Image (cartoon, rainbow, N blue to C red):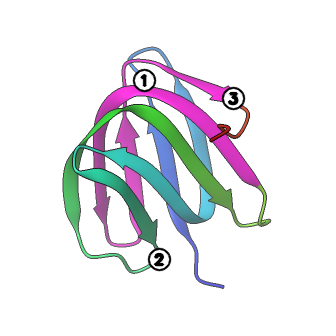
Amino acid sequence: MNTYSFRILTPLERKLDATVVSIVAPGEAGYLGVLANHAPIITTLKPGYLRVTLESDENKWFKIDGGILKVANNEAVLLTESIEETQAPSD
């Protein structure tokens, strides 16, 4: 299983610093999935739900208030003003 480093930063704190298998984030044009060895990208995110699959295969869900996601060299960083851990959204 390929993994990469993922951090979530707000102006006040480092919310998460983990080794992950994947993330699925609410991009401006739709949800964006990121796996290990993803091509470099910088994109804006809209408010919505972020799913993070940890190295342990556990899923964590967060509600974000939009932000910026940068992915390069098996490292991803999400910058956001507001984020809170939540339960999986119901459809």
Residue 64: percent from the left, percent from the top? 46, 28
Residue 10 marker: 1
Dot 2 or dot 3: first in sequence order is 2
Dot 2 or dot 1: first in sequence order is 1
The type of residue carrying mark 2 is: Ala
Q: What secondary structure is found at the residue carrying circle 3? A: strand
Check contact, mark 3 vs mark 1: CB within 8 A. no
- In the image, residue 69 lies in the stretch drawn in magenta: yes
Distance (Cα) linking label 2 and label 3? 24 Å
Is most of the magenta stretch helix, strand or loop? strand
Q: State the residue position of label 3.
A: 86
Check contact, mark 2 vs mark 3: CB within 8 A. no
Check contact, mark 2 vs mark 1: CB within 8 A. no
Considering depth in this image, is 37 or 65 the residue closer to the camera? 65
- Magenta range: 59-86
Residue drawn at 58 percent across, 45 percent down = 17
Residue drawn at 61 percent across, 63 percent down = 20
Considering depth in this image, is 5 or 34 the residue closer to the camera? 34
Residue 36 marker: 2
Q: Nearer the viewer, mark 3 or mark 1?
A: 3
Distance (Cα) linking label 3 and label 1? 17 Å
Q: Viewed as shown, does residue 41 lie left or right of 36?
A: left
The type of residue carrying mark 3 is: Thr
